[in-house]
């Protein structure tokens, strides 16, 4: 009987050691996976970014301020840049993540009152982003309001988001595979 007790005790100790080893391994692995973008919106006006990120900006529009807050665009508006962080990677990947972040925001950025043309089009989604020879081609699907003032706001926001990345010199925008220029030319922009 004492041999059976010893075997049971040995199996129990072995099981505890395996469980402890597995727990430590999982803790170490989960503690070192800081490659993902981690954004905490503790204050509606301020994005706080943690861990392994590269500083970028999100672009929003200050309506009717005649270029006071940034570059003059559209109908007397200006582009306002807000700090944001994305994980390291090629320009195409960082641009895609930045566009998705802007699409994920509401039509108005926090309590700031800044307009977010990408967020205002809740049925618009990002389909494809390519970067080749300095040209970023950005494809959206869905419905885009190309009204007289909204079209240049949308274009300025997307261009500002793209042109901040090294190696991107020009931007083409497509909605449902139709070039943005073609869409806005027919809308009387």
Image: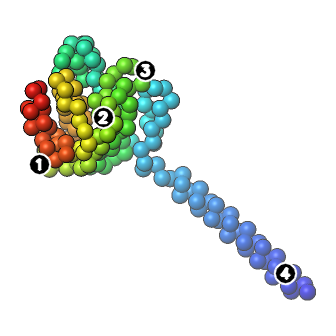
Mark 2 or mark 3: name the one nearer the start of the chain: 3
Q: Position of residue 12 (x, y in %)?
A: 78, 73
Residue 61: image location, x then y, percent: 28, 23
Q: Is residue 31 left or right of residue 112?
A: right
Which residue is tagged 2? 121
Give the residue displayed 91% in from the left and 86% down from the top.
1
Q: How far is disc 4 from disc 1 in space, using C-alphas? A: 71 Å
User: Taking the image as drawn, is residue 138 in sight?
Assistant: no
Q: Nearer the viewer, mark 3 or mark 4?
A: 3
Q: Whole-Å distance between the Cαs marked 3 and 4?
A: 68 Å
Q: Which mark is residue 133?
A: 1
Q: Earlier in the sequence, mark 1 or mark 2?
A: 2
Report the residue at 36% width, 25% height from top.
108
Q: Is residue 91 left or right of residue 134?
A: right
Mark 4 or 1, closer to the camera:
1
Task: From this view, report whether residue 120 is shown above or below residue 87.
Answer: above
For label 4, the residue is 6
């Amino acid at each position: 009987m004492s041999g059976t007790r010893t075997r049971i005790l040995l199996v129990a100790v072995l099981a505890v050691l395996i469980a402890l080893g597995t727990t430590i391994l999982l803790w170490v692995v989960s503690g070192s996976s800081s490659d993902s973008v981690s954004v905490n919106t503790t204050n509606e006006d301020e994005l706080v970014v943690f861990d392994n990120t590269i500083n970028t900006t999100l672009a929003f529009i200050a309506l009717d301020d005649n270029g006071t807050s940034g570059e003059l665009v559209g109908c007397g508006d200006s582009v306002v840049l807000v700090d944001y962080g994305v994980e390291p990677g090629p320009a195409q990947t960082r641009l895609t993540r930045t566009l998705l972040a802007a699409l994920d925001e509401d039509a108005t950025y926090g309590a700031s009152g800044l307009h977010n043309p990408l967020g205002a089009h809740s049925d618009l989604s990002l389909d494809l982003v390519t970067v080749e020879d300095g040209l970023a081609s950005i494809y959206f699907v869905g419905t885009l309001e190309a009204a007289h003032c909204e079209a240049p706001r949308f274009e300025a926001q997307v261009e500002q988001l793209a042109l901040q990345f090294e190696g991107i010199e020009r931007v083409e925008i497509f909605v449902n595979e139709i070039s943005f220029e073609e869409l806005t030319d027919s809308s009387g922009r």
